[in-house]
Each structure stands twice: as C-alpha cells, then as structure tokens.
Image (cartoon, grey):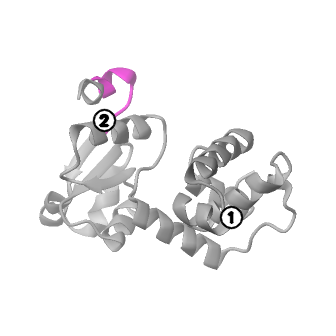
Amino acid sequence: MQDMLNWKNRGHRLVIVDMALLKQGCAEEQWSTYFDGLCVLVLSAHMSDAEGQLVLAKGASGYAHSHSSMESLALIVSSLESGAIWLGRSLLQKMLHDIDQRLPVAMDNHWAQPLSVREAEVARLAAVGYSNAEIAQKLLITERTVRAHLSAVFDKLHVDDRLQLALKVHGIRR
C-alpha cells in the first residue's frame, strides 16, 4: 500500500478506477481522453477477456480483478511502475494466440541466435500462448525447468514478459 501512495513522488501518475464507474461515468469513446498521459489500472468485479481487450485498447496499462488481495495489488502496481502492462493469464494467452494467428514467425530466426536449442523451443511455445505447465508437458520437462529457461530467454533477449517475447519471435521487435 505504501508503494501505491508513494507512486506520485516518483514522477508517475497512477489512477486506479473501477470498471463499473467507467461504464456509468462516460461513453467508451471518451475513455482514451481520460487515460491520456496517465498510468491507468482498471479493476473489474466481473472480468472478461473482451472487457480487458477493450480497456487496454483504450489506453489502460492494466486490468485486474477488483477483489485482488493487497499483496496482489502491490505486485501489479510495481509491475506497472516498471513499464509493464498487467493483464490476466487468460487474456494474455488469447492475445498471444491472436498474435500468432495474425503474424508469421520471423523467418530469419535472428532472435534465437543467443539461445540454446531448448531455450528457443521454450520461447516459441511461450510466445504462442502455451502456459508453463503445457510447455513442460509438451517438452517432457518440469515446470521449474521451463521457468529457468524462460528466465534465461528473457535475459538473453532483453524482454520483460511474454508479450514482448511474442513480438520478438514474430519479428516485430528487434
């Protein structure tokens, strides 16, 4: 909670807003105006992937459940402060799947050069939306090993999350 209170002191503007208030207070067309120049975390009691996509498309930096614990909110705020985007696992997997369907995997594989063969396999699977458990099952390794490979991949490719990884694998981000 103290981190949330000190946010403004670090030169950032964080706004936490309830989705119900957004729906009542203004038309969807106005949301991007309200979000402009701010880091907006939208909380919703009835989360859905469609709603999450909508608020992120309008400019929100995060989308989470309004009943999240204080510890979870502190983690979310910390992530937003570092420049990350926060969204639920289901929405992330949907977005990664959409990216994979719309964009071909980069033909040059330049992105994979610093990786071991296994790290590149894990990276490809993570980039198209597989969970750690699904990757572990598919590659016959443990989830702990998947997490270790992903940590190495993020470090070697200088990405912070799966969305950035997906963009790199698909040749969007160098």
Q: Count residues near mark 1 (Cα–Cα under 10 Å), then give few for <14, some for 14-19, many for 20+.
A: few
The foreground one among 148 and 32 is 148
For residue 77, say whether it is visible: yes
* Position of 20 relative to 102 (above/below): above
Q: How many marks?
A: 2
Residue 10, position as x, y percentages in the image: 38, 22
Vertical relation: 61 (above or below) 124: above
Is 3 rendered above or below residue 57?
above
- Under circle 2, the secondary element is helix
Asked if the residue under mark 2 is in contact with the one under mark 1, i.e. CB atoms within 8 Å, the reply is no
Element class at badge 1: helix
Question: Which residue type carries mark 2?
Answer: Ala
Of the numbered discs 1 and 2, the one sitting upstream in the chain is: 2
What residue span does the magenta drawing correspond to?
6-14
Q: Is residue 146 magenta?
A: no
Residue 140 appears left or right of 160 = right
Where is residue 107 drawn, in percent x and y? 84, 68
Q: Can residue 131 be seen in this snapshot?
A: no
- The residue shown at (64%, 69%) is 138
Q: Nearer the viewer, residue 84 or 55?
A: 84
Q: Nearer the viewer, mark 1 or mark 2?
A: 1
Q: Identify residue type, mark 1.
A: Leu
Name the side, left or right, on which 171 lies relative to 3: right
Q: Horizontally, is 83 left or right of 152 in the view?
A: left
Instruction: List the residue tagged with mark 1.
Output: 139
Q: Quadrant of the N terminus?
A: top left
User: In this figure, which residue is indicated by the disc labeled 2?
Assistant: 74
